[in-house]
Amino acid sequence: MSDCTACQRDGVNRREFLSASSALAITALLAACGDGDNGNSTGPITVNTTVVLANYSALGTVGGIAVISGAGTPLAVVRSTTSQYRAFSLICPHAGTTVAVNGDGFRCPNHGATFTASGAWTGGERTKGLTEFTVAVNSTAGTLTITS
């Protein structure tokens, strides 16, 4: 019995099979690529931590970036002006990989997405920017309180 006869016997002809297979392959490809706004694969990120500025020498200068330890989630703080700081999740919004400081910004080692020091996506795999948190500065105590 030929393949076509077997397909017809089972109620599926070759054209229907190829059409359905192609549609399935295209759907899988589009789902894998997505629109770049996949969200965080680990769900919402909650942060409530205090950072002692004296513990992070990189934050002594404008443009300095420090990876914060002990916050429960990977964080980076950027000193954006002489009196302002910004805090970002280091969890890549594309697939949940931890991004690394790369020069004056960030880079995902998993798929190559790059981000500025302000958290904006600039290249590599298309995704949204890094999640930013609220930063309250207590200049008297020399601390930052970072919350989501």
Image (spheres, rainbow, N blue to C red):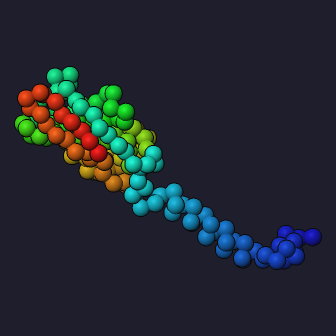
Instruction: Give the percent coordinates (x, y) of residue 132.
Output: 26, 47
From the viewer's perspective, tell me whether residue 22 is left or right of residue 44.
right
Residue 19, horizontal then vertical, whole percent: 66, 74
Where is residue 123 shown, x and y percent of the image? 31, 50
Residue for point 43% across, 48% down: 43
131 above or below 65? below
Work out whether residue 143 or residue 1 is closer to the camera in this orientation and state it.
Answer: 143
Name the one closer to the observer, 34 or 67. Answer: 67
- Residue 47 seen: yes
- Which x, y percent locates residue 128? 33, 54
Name the residue: 24% across, 31% down: 50
User: In the figure, residue 5 lies in which quadrant?
Assistant: bottom right
Residue at image location 17% in from the left, 27% down from the top: 53
* Residue 144 location, quadrant: top left
Quarter the N terminus occupies: bottom right
User: Would residue 61 be found to the left or right of residue 98 on screen?
Assistant: left
Left or right of 74 on screen, residue 104: left
Residue 105 can be seen, yes or no: no
x 37%, y 33%: residue: 72
Q: Quadrant of residue 9?
A: bottom right
